[in-house]
Amino acid sequence: MEKEFNVTGSCNPQKHYMVDIAHKFDEVMKLIEKGKYFTINRPRQYGKTTMLNMLFNNLSKNEYLTIFLSFEGVGDIIFENESAFSAAFVRMFLRELNSLSQKITDDFSKCALNVSNLETLSEAVSIFARELGKRIVILIDEVDKSSNNQLFVSFLGMLRDKYLRRDRGEKTFHSVVLAGVYDVKSLKLKIRKDTETKLNSPWNIAADFNVDMSFNPAEIKTMLVSYAKDKKVKMDLNAISNRIYYYTSGYPFLVSKICKNIDEEEAGQNPDFNPKHWRLEDVDWSFRWLTRPMYTTTNFDDMIKNLENNKDLFALVRAVSVEGKEVSAAADNPVVNLGITYGILSANEDKIVVSNRVYEQRIATYMQSKQETSELKDCS
Ligand SMILES: Nc1ncnc2c1ncn2[C@@H]1O[C@H](COP(=O)(O)OP(=O)(O)OP(=O)(O)O)[C@@H](O)[C@H]1O
Ligand SMILES: [Mg+2]
């Protein structure tokens, strides 16, 4: 199958030109081998699901039993009560096991016969983990879609309690990996409705996730090497990788998008383009094409939605980008932290900056237009 650059959904090495993320993968594997519970918390389209897929494919070949769950699109009904949630969890778990082995599926079915709430679900997990004799790793994607939900938070609390008791011999999941934009560790919610309001994180056992998921120029080069070889395209690989990094700061979606534009769109737009020889000017063209004011894509839509939905964040981004104000990089300041969480801002030494030149350009166009339309309102 002919490969292409991918900008929609997770990447598949059979179908897509990809940056080699082996180093990142090794770092994540170390956390799993150590039995850590953690969240891959990174902005939208930052390679989270691609990483989970890679973990799933590799862990399953080793001594782990790996379950990959996503709560995306499961509907609200399962969150109505503990019984519905526990039953749904068992169903999802069985569905995943079913694709692995009939025997393991039957074993879990037996353990889960009496599951009717989180407590009995917890017991079923313990019995299953003890009898299986294999380490179980659970990967849960799109946790943001559920983490505003009390029951999901209680479920995380259940996992935490089991984690805390494993030193006392309780069997549970060896490692739990969540993926989402927010750091679930910092969720501050009450654990149980029926007890006093307890400000507590359901996930305060989670290890920090410090793996750099952005692509450095050397990593970007790995994708260009496979493309250039495959399509017999000439280019100065180091110079082009550096130029792509210059515009994107290694944001995975933007890196793939810049390349896709050149590969698939430039020929139709730029008469000077030679598809068999990429030059630095082509990267410049791709940047201009991506930031043209009347083009948008879900990644930009999300960024703008985040600015429109939070006045403080809007003011901060405007101060940094338009007014050139210096703002300290302080992760303890919630609005600064939020800007970084969304991938709009990043820390450059001890100051806050817009995280890449593509966003800088998009934000400049957006802020100018907002200014123009607000002046219209002032005149009326
Ligand atoms: N290894 C890679 N090589 C090249 N591009 C990549 C790679 N990983 C991710 N990307 C780019 O990032 C995009 C998003 O990838 P993925 O769906 O894995 O991210 P995500 O963080 O799960 O996104 P979302 O927040 O939307 O769930 C891909 O469509 C692709 O453009
Ligand atoms: Mg994803």
Image (cartoon, helix red, strand yellow):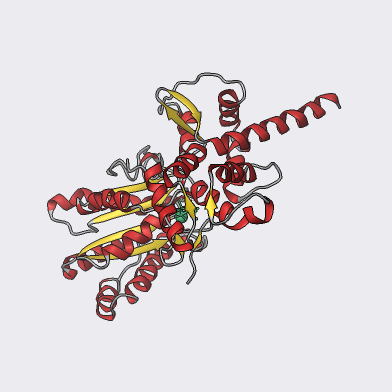
Q: Residue at x 58, y 40 (%)?
A: 306
Q: Is residue 175 left or right of residue 280?
A: left
Q: Is residue 94 above or below residue 297?
A: below
What x and y, as percent, mark residue 354?
52, 31
Whether residue 331 is visible here, answered yes or no, is yes
Q: Residue at x 48, y 65 (%)?
A: 3
- Image quadrant occupied by the C terminus: top right
Whether residue 80 is visible here, answered yes or no, is no
43 or 274, which lies in front?
274
Q: Is residue 105 above or below residue 159?
A: below
Q: Furthest residue to the bottom?
A: 102
Q: Furthest residue to the right?
A: 380
Q: Furthest residue to the left?
A: 168
377 or 237, which lies in front?
237
What x and y, as percent, mark residue 133?
15, 68
Q: Residue at x 49, y 47 (%)?
A: 255
What x and y, as percent, mark residue 256?
50, 51
